[in-house]
Image (cartoon, rainbow, N blue to C red):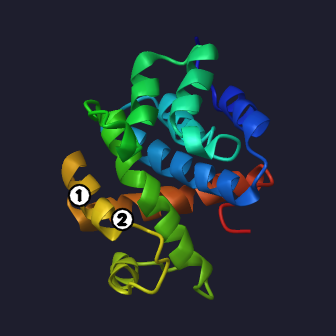
């Protein structure tokens, strides 16, 4: 099966109507694409993995991500892709053995956190620095649903320094926002 963004996005829209969940999936897609470039991996495949990682969350929250895995299998996605999606949820106790799986786990929470940081800034993405994100990470009242410990541990699991990890995610989101705007989409609007 050839993995394309178009097919992945069409599939996502069959299961997800929530604008906020679509934006989250787009943000994780952006970070996955950025890391795919960094690691010399297939950008389309990694991006699709980020885009589809929460495909079941809206309709089947109690079965997440297991229902999503069924959907991905039915649609012919490869095993490493499916295992990455399965491994992004701690409750499945699935070891993250591939870079794709480790990256998805590492960018899931952080992508949303960086977007939360951007949304409270008057200049949005413009001039966003790692130190600003780190300062917000220390503020437990800000985006309190985000698991800060998971962000730190997942960066270690991926084998990247937290500062570098945050910078990669910022860069990926900034670049992808420009591309998405051309399609009439946005991570923040």
**Secondary-structure class at tag 2:** helix
Please report the residue visible at 28 percent of the width from the left and 66 percent of the height from the top: 149
Residue 96, given in percent of the width and then of the height, sits at 28, 35
Relative to the observer, which residue lies in front, 177 or 28? 28
Relative to the observer, which residue lies in front, 11 or 178? 11
Please report the residue visible at 73 percent of the width from the left and 44 percent of the height from the top: 16
The mark found on residue 153 in the picture is 1
Report, in whole angstroms, how far the alpha carbon at label 2 lies from the one at label 1: 16 Å
- Identify the image quadrant of the N terminus: top right
Looking at marks 2 and 1 on the same chain, the residue that comes earlier in the sequence is marked by: 1
Residue 82, given in percent of the width and then of the height, sits at 46, 25
The mark found on residue 70 in the picture is none
Q: Can residue 154 be seen in this view?
A: yes
From this view, report whether residue 24 is shown above or below residue 4. below
Residue 172, given in percent of the width and then of the height, sits at 48, 55
Residue 7, given in percent of the width and then of the height, sits at 70, 26
Among the 4 quarters of the image, the one containing residue 160: bottom left
Give the side of residue 94 with respect to residue 53, left or right: left
Please report the residue visible at 56 percent of the width from the left and 55 percent of the height from the top: 27
Q: Mark 2 points at which residue?
A: 167
Please report the residue visible at 68 percent of the width from the left and 47 percent of the height from the top: 58
Indicate which label's residue lies in the foreground, 2 or 1: 1
Q: Can residue 125 be seen in this view?
A: no
- Identify the image quadrant of the C terminus: bottom right
């Amino acid at each position: 099966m050839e993995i394309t963004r178009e097919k992945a996005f069409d599939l996502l829209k069959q299961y997800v109507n929530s604008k906020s969940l679509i934006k989250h999936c787009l943000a994780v897609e952006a970070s996955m694409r950025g890391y795919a470039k960094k690691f010399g991996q297939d950008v389309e495949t990694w991006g699709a993995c980020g885009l589809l990682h929460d495909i079941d969350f809206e309709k089947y929250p109690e079965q997440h991500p297991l229902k999503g895995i069924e959907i991905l299998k039915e649609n012919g996605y490869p095993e490493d892709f499916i295992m990455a999606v399965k491994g992004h949820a701690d409750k499945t106790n699935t070891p993250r053995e591939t870079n794709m799986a480790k990256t998805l786990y590492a960018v899931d929470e952080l992508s949303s956190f960086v977007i939360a940081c951007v949304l409270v800034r008057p200049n949005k993405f413009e001039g966003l620095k790692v130190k600003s994100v780190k300062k917000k990470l220390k503020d437990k009242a800000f985006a309190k649903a985000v698991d800060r410990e998971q962000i730190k541990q997942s960066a270690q699991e991926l084998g990247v320094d937290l500062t570098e990890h945050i910078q990669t995610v910022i860069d990926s989101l900034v670049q992808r926002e420009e591309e998405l705007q051309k399609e009439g989409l946005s991570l923040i609007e």
